């Protein structure tokens, strides 16, 4: 489209007062001439004046397209007033901000929201309150259940992300706490930086978790300790306010949901789309091969190609233009043809292509179980009478995190990485298919059904799906964890310890993937009991989460026989 020169008016630190009297401040970008335009709003805790605030949508370019753009510091962050405490104020603060934005003299009364991660959560926190002026959203890589990627997963603590995020947000706290004390501020920042630098090497190992030393030494994150005081409780703050699941009923805001196969919030990104679609709201989904912070063609150790990057999606568009097309349709009534296109677009790894789909999950996908078998084999044939496999899990020497859908310190980058070093460990079992004679596509949800025995009253089981290349590289696609005491949490059961020596059935949610296992490759499933520091180490004691300090060794038995057919369900896609 042809763009004419536009004069842009920029107002910095524009105040607005919330219902409780707190003042938030925003940068406002708009066309300089007289008129009224739709508003695009984002609310973030990471600093409206820093580059991250405009990384997904350039405010100046959006103004050229005929929008007002408002970038606001959330409560207690940047130059906004109030105290920083995550999640709990975002619903009412978002509703108040939307109403304020819609009433500005240069606003036409319509508001769209955009942003990623936490400032994608601020969209949902407001949307579930159904503010009338909110007409469209583009949530990017965010959650709906804090125990499905934010604070926990499968009953385990999402330690790597939780600790680094709360500690990293401490900089904002220190800048405000010592605003009038430059010497004290400089000292505090040096101490915080040292804690951040040591987190990957030593800090993550701190016990007990409910007295996590890096955050006790730096008193900047009371929310972390509130979470550990009520572990895995959706009813206690801040988790109650961070929970979107169960509150989306009736929301009809048109939603373009965007995520990545290696993003820490992939599971809930998909669930958010499915929820909106199921209740008849206008909804679209885009999933790239990306991690939370890597949106280019190179993610981890794999180069998915030039057209994989968010800046040139399918060699046709980019995230900024895609978002503006969405807003053009819903806020301006423009004929963008966007709604004529299929609702889902996914990147199919292996083939490294983008593909449009009618919905998610794919209706044509066939759920096929691949069973663990003797001799470390993985095959679609059910097992007969077979001997189990064994390994010893020692929390003092946990299986380390290598890649995956993570958000940790720099020592633990996210994405696809060769897992052979992990698989060489004695506490990791691998089950591998025969060499594939032809391409095999796996696209859709992934679930492992595992029958196992432990010598401990509580322990963890981790499963990981890998693509094994002809040269032996074993590249991770997705993984999941289940804590034994939380084995039936999905059915609403209260956590309970297991009986040592007794077999139990565990369901491990690996979320989803889209990958073509090319001819000559093999399918591999790893089974182990830790992925540290991504998830906290289960110390095998049966003590409440975060309270124990002394690890105990667990002897693990993995069953795969006719009575205990451990398997992964693979959604196989046959192309017409």
Image: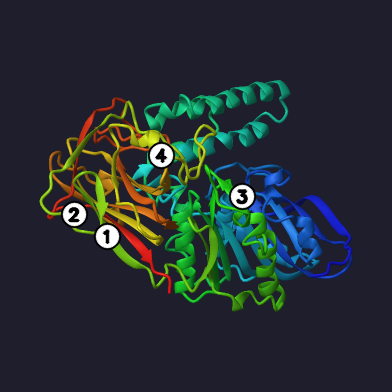
| Residue 258 sits above or below residue 468 on the image | below
- Secondary structure under tag 2 reads loop
Asked if marks 4 and 3 touch (Cβ < 8 Å), the reply is no
Q: Distance from label 1 to label 2 (Cα)?
A: 10 Å
Numbered mark located on residue 369 in the image:
1
Q: Nearer the viewer, mark 2 or mark 4?
A: 4
Q: Distance from label 3 to label 2 (Cα)?
A: 40 Å
Residue for point 30% across, 56% down: 490
Report x, y in % for residue 295: 60, 50
Q: 493 or 441, which lies in front?
A: 441
| Residue 400 sits above or below residue 233 on the image | above
Q: Distance from label 2 to label 4 (Cα)?
A: 25 Å
Q: Which residue is mark 3?
A: 296
Asked if marks 1 and 2 touch (Cβ < 8 Å), the reply is yes
Q: Which residue is mark 2?
A: 565
Residue for point 89% across, 60% down: 7
Q: Which residue is mark 4?
A: 419
Report x, y in % for residue 302: 52, 46
- Secondary structure under tag 4 reads loop
Give the mark nearer the N terminus: 4 vs 3. Answer: 3
Q: Distance from label 4 to label 3 (Cα)?
A: 22 Å
Give the mark nearer the N terminus: 1 vs 4. Answer: 1
Give the mark nearer the N terminus: 2 vs 4. Answer: 4
């Amino acid at each position: 489209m042809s763009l004419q020169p536009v004069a842009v008016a920029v107002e910095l630190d524009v105040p607005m007062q919330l219902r409780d009297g707190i003042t938030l401040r925003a940068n406002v970008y708009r066309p300089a001439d007289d008129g009224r335009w739709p508003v695009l709003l984002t609310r973030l805790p990471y600093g409206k004046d820093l580059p991250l605030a405009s990384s997904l949508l350039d405010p100046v370019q959006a103004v050229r397209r005929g929008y007002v753009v408002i970038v606001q510091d959330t409560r207690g962050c940047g130059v906004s007033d109030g105290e920083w405490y995550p999640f709990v104020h975002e619903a009412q603060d978002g509703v108040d901000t939307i109403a304020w934005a819609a009433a500005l003299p240069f606003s036409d009364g319509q508001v769209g929201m955009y942003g990623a991660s936490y400032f994608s959560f601020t969209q949902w926190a407001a949307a579930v309150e159904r503010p009338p002026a909110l007409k469209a959203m583009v949530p990017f890589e965010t959650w709906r259940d804090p125990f499905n990627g934010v604070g926990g997963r499968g009953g385990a603590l999402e330690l790597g992300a939780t600790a680094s995020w709360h500690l990293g947000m401490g900089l904002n706290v220190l800048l405000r706490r010592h605003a009038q004390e430059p010497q004290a501020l400089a000292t505090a920042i040096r101490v915080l930086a040292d804690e951040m630098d040591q987190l990957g090497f030593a800090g993550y190992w701190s016990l007990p978790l409910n007295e996590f030393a890096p955050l006790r030494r730096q008193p900047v994150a009371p929310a972390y300790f509130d979470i550990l005081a009520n572990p895995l409780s959706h009813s206690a703050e801040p988790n109650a306010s961070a929970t979107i699941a169960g509150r989306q009923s009736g929301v009809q805001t048109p939603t373009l949901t965007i995520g990545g196969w290696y993003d820490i919030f992939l599971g809930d990104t998909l669930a958010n789309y499915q929820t909106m679609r199921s209740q008849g709201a206008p909804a679209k989904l885009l999933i790239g091969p990306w991690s939370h912070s890597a949106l280019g063609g190179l993610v981890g150790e794999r180069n998915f190609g030039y057209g994989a990057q968010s800046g040139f999606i399918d060699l046709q568009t980019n995230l900024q233009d895609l978002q503006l097309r969405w807003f053009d349709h819903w806020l301006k009534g423009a004929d963008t043809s966007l709604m004529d296109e299929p609702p889902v677009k996914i990147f199919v790894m292996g083939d490294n292509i983008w593909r449009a789909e009618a919905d998610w999950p794919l209706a044509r996908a066939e759920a096929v179980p691949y069973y663990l078998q003797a001799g470390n084999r993985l095959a679609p044939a059910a097992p007969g009478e077979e001997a189990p496999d064994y390994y010893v899990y020692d929390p003092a020497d946990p299986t380390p995190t290598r890649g995956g859908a993570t958000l940790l310190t720099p020592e633990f980058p996210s994405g696809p990485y060769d897992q052979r070093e992990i698989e060489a460990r004695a506490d990791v079992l691998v089950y591998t298919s025969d060499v594939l004679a032809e391409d095999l596509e796996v696209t859709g949800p992934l679930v492992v059904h595992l029958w196992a025995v432990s010598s401990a009253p509580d322990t963890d089981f981790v499963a990981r799906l890998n693509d094994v290349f002809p040269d032996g590289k074993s590249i991770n696609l997705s993984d999941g964890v289940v804590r034994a005491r939380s084995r039936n949490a999905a059915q609403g059961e209260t956590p309970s310890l297991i009986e040592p020596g007794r077999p139990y059935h565990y369901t491990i949610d690996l979320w989803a993937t889209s990958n073509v296992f090319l001819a000559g490759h093999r399918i591999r499933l790893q089974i182990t009991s830790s992925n540290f520091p991504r998830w906290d180490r289960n110390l095998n004691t049966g003590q409440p989460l975060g309270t124990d300090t002394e690890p105990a060794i667990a002897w693990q038995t993995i069953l795969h026989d006719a009575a205990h057919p451990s398997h992964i369900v693979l959604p196989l896609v046959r192309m017409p």
